[in-house]
Image (cartoon, rainbow, N blue to C red):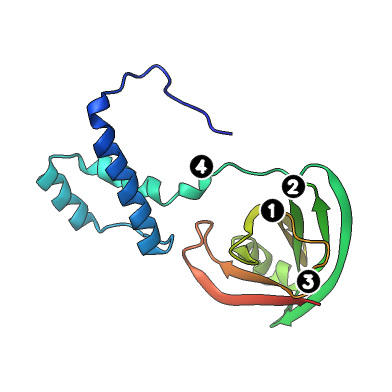
Amino acid sequence: MRHNTHPTVPYNEQLLSIDEQICALLKQRKVLSNNNPGLPSSKVISSWADKYELYEDYLNHLFETMRFEGLFKSRIEPTGYRKHLSVLKSIEHGERIYSVTVIRQYQNASVIQLHVDWDGTEDLQVDSQLKHHNNTFELYIGNQYECRQDRAGGSTGHFTYNFIVSPPLPDNISEIDLIFKEYTDTLKEQPTGLEIVMHLD
């Protein structure tokens, strides 16, 4: 759902062509950066501020906001539960087991849970559980699907990541690959190098 947050603010129609060019440049920037633009250096920001008579803080906030585009995307919430699809797949990597047991099917989306299990006794010794909780995962299934991590939580020796997939997966999930990629930050800019691939057959 889209909301107009400034319906009463007057607008100078002479700005239309310029504002459209800004939108076109944002799209070009997004494609060229492959959705990972980073931030210009403080030296570059300062130079641009002087050159174009703009405030440095304004430019910093502008480029920072571009990194959070995904936060403004309308979010689908699963509605109309239909059925469970049995998956029962697991992969061992190092001292951890990564598993997907079922996929919940809804009218407008699918819900996938990635379970991570390990020897919980180490949590009390080196606080490895806390370190693990600071990481996050991205799910990729194909360009036709949007995969959003909804929430995550766990306890000693166990952690679960929930993903909402839209449009919903077909009930016949054979030949589908679930690719989970781990990051150390919520913006998904710092991959750990861990990639879990589960082939559903």
Instruction: Tell which tag, 3 or 4, sits nearer the viewer.
Output: 4
Q: Quadrant of residue 36?
A: bottom left
Give the crowd class for mark 1: few <14, some 14-19, many >=20 residues within 10 Å. Answer: some
- Determine whether, in the image, residue 190 is placed left or right of residue 126: left
User: Which of the two discs, 2 and 4, labels the residue nearer the N terminus?
Assistant: 4
**Residue under the point 65% across and 71% down:** 179
Q: Quadrant of residue 194?
A: bottom right
Q: Amino acid at mark 4?
A: Phe
Q: Mark 2 to mark 3: distance in Å?
A: 24 Å
**Residue under the point 64% across and 61% down:** 133
- Nearest to the observer: residue 84 or residue 157: 84
Q: Confirm or deny contact between disc 2 and disc 4 (CB under 8 A).
A: no
Q: Name the residue beneath numbered marker 3.
A: 99
- Determine whether, in the image, residue 172 is placed left or right of residue 21: right
Q: Name the residue beneath numbered marker 4.
A: 72
Q: Name the residue beneath numbered marker 1.
A: 167
Q: Confirm or deny contact between disc 1 and disc 4 (CB under 8 A).
A: no
In the rendered image, the residue lying farthest to the left is 51
Q: Which of the image's four quarters has the C terminus? A: bottom right
- Nearest to the observer: residue 38 or residue 1: 1
- Determine whether, in the image, residue 119 is placed left or right of residue 130: right
Q: Amino acid at mark 1?
A: Pro
Tell me the element at label 4. Answer: helix
